[in-house]
Image (tube, rainbow, N blue to C red):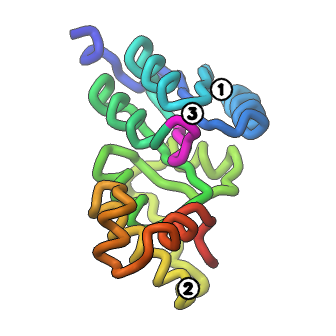
Amino acid sequence: MAEDLFEIGDDRTLLLVDDDDAFLKRLAKAMEKRGFDVETADSVAAGKAIATARPPAYAVCDLRLEDGNGLDVVEVLRAKRPDCRIVVLTGYGAIATAVAAVKIGATDYLSKPADATDITNALLATGADLPPPPENPMSADRVRWEHIQRVYELCDRNVSETARRLNMHRRTLQRILAKRSPR
């Protein structure tokens, strides 16, 4: 298969998938200045189409997109190009979603706001690079948020089943999931 012949080496193709148009344009411009050959998509459908037709050497996917979950794009990328280095980017950072992203095949996971330098470092990092330990421990609200996210991922992102397991009203859970993670 042609997909198996790709090697990263000099290949600087980069797919950016994000539904925030202003952020997508700024990041694309910044990554082009860093030597990447950038292609953008603003939805899961567009990201999957590009990943299937022209699998890139690198990719940055937002986790939550208007038409679905960015992890669906990660799965297609991993299937089409196993050596692709993928960073999942999200404003809804949680341990459960980070674990899910890495299990599916993401190379790294960054919380927004992340700048082009952070993203470039994550894309080009070697296995020996370790992030520094956190300066502040998690708050009680953050621990609760992490637990809810973990159960949500274990229930395959099914809100009703997650609410049942957490003994929580479904609408309350939906409100919690729609908010950004506490600090």
Which residue was labeled with disc 2? 141
Q: Which amino acid does label 1 sit on?
A: Gly
Q: What element carries label 1?
A: loop
Question: Nearest the camera: 25 or 31?
Answer: 25
Marks 3/2: CA–CA distance: 30 Å
Q: Residue at x 60, y 43 (%)?
A: 120
Q: Name the residue under label 1.
A: 35
Q: What residue type is labelled 2?
A: Asp
- 106 magenta-colored: no
Q: In the visual, does 116 lie left or right of 148?
A: right
Q: Is residue 66 magenta?
A: yes
SS class, disc 2: helix
Can you identify the residue that label 3 sits on?
Answer: 17
Q: Residues within 10 Å of mark 2 (few under 14, many from 20)?
A: few
Instruction: Residue type at mark 3: give it.
Output: Val
Q: What stretch is highlighted in magenta?
A: 60-67
Q: Main SS of the magenta segment? A: strand
